[in-house]
Amino acid sequence: MTSPFTLFHRVVLGLCLMLTSLAAAAAPERSPEQVIRYSVDELMGQIEGRRDYYADNMNELKALVDENLDDIADFRYIGASVMGRYFQNATPQQRSRFANVFRQTLIDTYTKGLVTFDYRELRVLDSQRPPRHEDQASVSMEVVAMDGTVYPVSYTLRLTDGQWKVVNVIVNGINLGLTFRNQFDQAMRDHGRDYDAVIASWSPEIATEELEQGGDA
């Protein structure tokens, strides 16, 4: 049987960028905190009481998440960030393909986590740090597991075309955007800087032990 933390590990990958997937397009008049708070409530309301159904109909849940992602996550920005120093030399087609592949791998993992992870509470914190820049903000929340373990989650949002969109997340002190960037860099080294091979084999991973122990954000 999968351990509770492994189940949390699954949902974390989805929470990286997709916990807000069922929200409507974020209205500019909403603060980033309001966007996240509304989205968490909306998503949990959709899933609660239907986990068994979605467990047997994963494609429905995947389609539901996929349908709403474009309004929430800036995957082109994320893809460029994960590709890092390799982004400049990638062709437009390779950049687009990687953004799509990155998105799909997270959708696949997230949908599994939504129906398997048992949580006690998801709470967006009332006190938020003031934004450093007008077009960037962070929103903090906590995921409380059934055993009482609290996992801090911090979203990074960016104002894009008048909408707040998620571009990164830090879980238990682990910067997932940076972790994925390091993994992309290693994959490029392993494949002799063959972009097409890296994109075709992309499968983001985060060690369970790393998340459990946390890190310095």
Image (tube, rainbow, N blue to C red):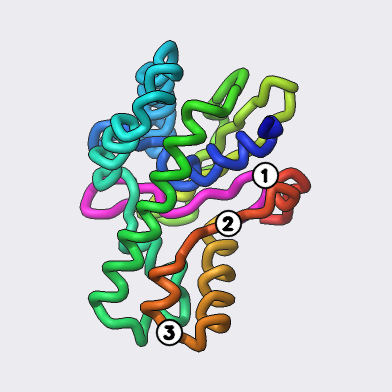
Indicate the quadrant containing the N terminus: top left, top right, bottom left or bottom right. top right
Residue drawn 73% across and 22% down?
Answer: 148
Residue at mark 1 = 172
Q: First in sequence: mark 2 or mark 3?
A: 3
- Mark 2 to mark 3 CA distance (whole Å): 20 Å
| Chief secondary structure of the magenta portion | strand
Q: Amino acid at mark 2?
A: Glu
Marking on residue 32: none
> Are the two marked residues, 2 and 3, in contact with CB atoms closer than 8 angstroms?
no
Residue at mark 2 = 205
- Mark 1 to mark 2 CA distance (whole Å): 16 Å
Residue drawn 44% across and 17% down?
Answer: 52
Q: Decide: is 96 above or below 160.
A: below
> Are the two marked residues, 3 and 1, in contact with CB atoms closer than 8 angstroms?
no
Number of other residues with Cα within 10 Å of mark 3, as a class: few under 14, some 14 to 19, many 20 or more: few
Q: Nearer the viewer, residue 60 or 216?
A: 60
Q: Is residue 153 left or right of residue 37?
A: right
Residue at mark 3 = 194
Number of other residues with Cα within 10 Å of mark 2, as a class: few under 14, some 14 to 19, many 20 or more: few
Mark 1 or 2, closer to the camera: 2
Region in magenta: 159-175
Q: Amino acid at mark 3?
A: Asp
One can see residue 134 in this view = no
Disc 1, SS: loop
Q: Decide: is 130 above or below 181.
A: above
Q: Nearer the viewer, residue 14 or 105?
A: 105
At which x and y percent is residue 213? 77, 47
Disc 3, SS: loop
Magenta stretch encompasses residue 167: yes
Q: Decide: is 27 above or below 17.
A: above
Q: Decide: is 20 above or below 133.
A: above
